[in-house]
């Protein structure tokens, strides 16, 4: 029998982790059941779960509070980017709001 989850996948949460400075809203896109506590992968977004940006980071269950709102878009973009373009090391950036690809940068003439 497992533990109760603090948040569901695709739920909008309020993250208050001092490591990242100012608190922010995010969307849960993945979940890991660790031996001591649960870990949730969260992408920063607005309070409605739209306009996600930046890298996906792992947070402990003590670092956020669920809002009860759901948003499926960030999770879909995360999984599609991973499937089509691979890990951040293969893409050239670690955000999941775009698909920056190494070698696909436009030529800049100075």
Image (cartoon, rainbow, N blue to C red):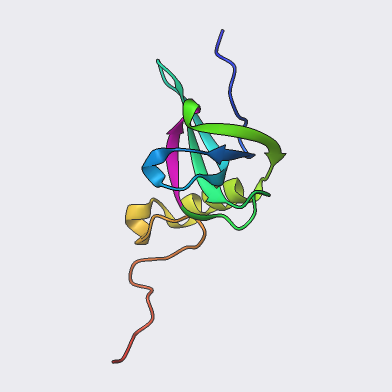
Front residue of 35 and 65: 65
Front residue of 33 and 13: 13
Residue at the image point whose x is 40% and y is 16% from the top: 36
Query: Taking 87 as reference, is 9 above or below it?
Result: above
The residue most toward the left is 110
The residue most toward the top is 1
Front residue of 98 and 67: 67
17 lies left or right of 14: left
Percent x, y of residue 72:
66, 45
Percent x, y of residue 92:
34, 61
What is the chief secondary structure element of the magenta stretch? Answer: strand
Residue at the image point whose x is 44% and y is 38% from the top: 17
Quadrant of the frame with the N terminus: top right
In which quarter of the view is residue 11 placed?
top right
Residue at the image point whose x is 60% and y is 58% from the top: 51
Percent x, y of residue 28:
56, 39
Percent x, y of residue 93:
37, 60
Query: In this picture, which residue range is highlighted in magenta?
Result: 55-61
Query: Taking 38 as reference, is 80 above or below it?
Result: below
The residue most toward the bottom is 110
């Amino acid at each position: 029998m497992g533990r109760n989850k603090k948040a569901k996948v695709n739920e909008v949460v309020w993250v208050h982790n001092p490591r990242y400075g100012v608190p922010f809203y995010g969307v849960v896109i993945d979940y890991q059941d660790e031996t001591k506590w649960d870990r949730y992968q969260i992408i920063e977004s607005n309070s409605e779960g739209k306009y996600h940006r930046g890298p996906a980071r792992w947070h402990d269950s003590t670092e956020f509070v669920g809002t009860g709102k759901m948003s499926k878009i960030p999770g879909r973009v995360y999984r599609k980017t991973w499937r089509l373009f691979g890990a951040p090391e293969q893409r050239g950036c670690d955000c999941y709001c775009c698909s920056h690809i190494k070698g696909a940068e436009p030529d800049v003439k100075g």
